[in-house]
Image: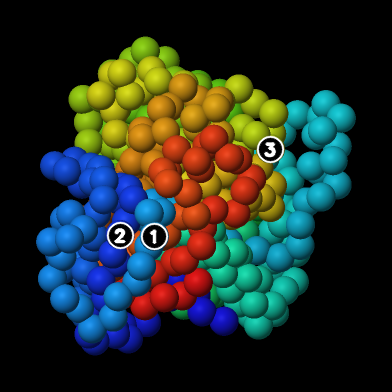
Amino acid sequence: MRSVTDDGERPSGSTLFDRIGLLYTGDPAREEIHDAALVVEDGHVAWVGHAGSAPDADERIDVDGRCVIPGFVDSHAHLVFAGDRTAEFAARMTGRPYTAGGIRTTVSATRAASDAELVARTATLVAEMLAQGTTTVEIKSGYGLTVEDERRSLEIASGFTPETTYLGAHVVPPDVPSAEEYVRLVTGEMLKACAPHARWVDVFCERGAFDADQSGEILRAGMRAGLMPRVHANQLGPGPGVRLAAELDAASADHCTHLTDDDVSILSSSGVVATLLPGAEFSTRSPYPDARRLLDAGVTVALATDCNPGSSFTSSMPFCVALAVREMGMTPVEAIRAATHGGAEALRRGDVGTLRVGTRGDLVILDAPTYVHLAYRPGVPLVTQVWKEGRRLV
Ligand code: NIG
Ligand code: FE
């Protein structure tokens, strides 16, 4: 199975993508080019411009008027888990609210699973994502919640992506007697075991999970261990998550469903990306975050799937783009920007999410004349080809 693995193996030679009807580059300097062409050489974009003036290349792909976009950057996903929560979802659809209490069900199933089972399940989800155009994915731990189960979750995640996130602070597991004791573990022995396999540290800063002081302590400990912070913030109600994210110069505050005016101005005057996860609101029947309010305040917005078995069991960035346009007040171009360039900003990556000279040759050919069709034709499999570092994977 081909995956979104950064395996270092780069193709040599050049590929010309010719007769692109609409190229969405994600590059603010030149965001859209009609009748375009693009050359990828040795895994990176070597030339972007108008069809007809493109240089020769070893291979030519006739895009035949279709739309080309950068590979999606899914900057928030929880892929290492076992079991599912079908019954919880079905109960929710009869009116039961989402409380995040089901995380413990997934923790039990994940602890009971073998390494091989977890690897295989993660690979399946990563392959699903790739088939829907995702070429960069962040993967969190958070369903192990013991030193060894968190460590192995991150080791497994790092087999699929360099964007691994330590989320030992997802909830306090039932077998640990107090939150204080668990915070000690998360900031001590567990962090020590996990840090070598992680790039990021995250915390579920929410009533019923970790409060502002605990969250700050956990994130600061992670930062001292060399990890960069990101925060699950303001998902189920208003709270201190966004403020904490700004205080610590986190790359991203994720969810941002319940924001005060103060939270919005904090986001707009900081470098924190607001990562919106509409799959979660879809699946929990909660009100969607107000993307329009954030964009009008000048906040950088990312879109991601939050793929997990409880609140958002979708691996589809096109679905999230459609929801963002239909339900969250984003225009199609704002949504595609958030799903590519925005996701890259949320991961502090300049080499993905944009197609300009020097970035990675990660691109998607849509069977459509424009990316607008991602929202206009929801649920239709428009992703026809996926290229990563200049190699065709789908
Ligand atoms: O991002 N909110 C915390 N974590 C996940 C949900 C986890 C679950 O319900 O299993 C989220 O929505
Ligand atoms: Fe999440």
Which residue is outermost to the top?
261
Of the residues under marks 3 and 1, which one precedes in the sequence? 1
Q: Residues within 10 Å of mark 2 (few under 14, many from 20)?
A: many
Taking 25 as reference, is 5 left or right? right
Does mark 1 have its CB less than 8 Å from ligand 2? no
Check disc 1 and report the residue beneath it.
64
The x and y percentages for residue 342 are: 32, 43
Please name the amino acid that badge 2 sits on. Arg
Asked whether 370 or 73 is in front, the reply is 370
Residue at 25%, 24% in the rendered image:
298
- Colour scheme shown: rainbow
Check disc 3 and report the residue beneath it.
283
Asked whether 61 or 177 is in front, the reply is 61
Can see residue 40?
yes
Could you tell me which secondary element the residue under label 2 belongs to? strand
Check disc 2 and report the residue beneath it.
19
Taking 96 as reference, is 242 left or right? left
Could you tell me which secondary element the residue under label 1 belongs to? loop
Could you tell me which secondary element the residue under label 3 belongs to? helix
Tally the marks: 3
Residue at 60%, 22% in the rendered image:
287
The x and y percentages for residue 325 are: 49, 30
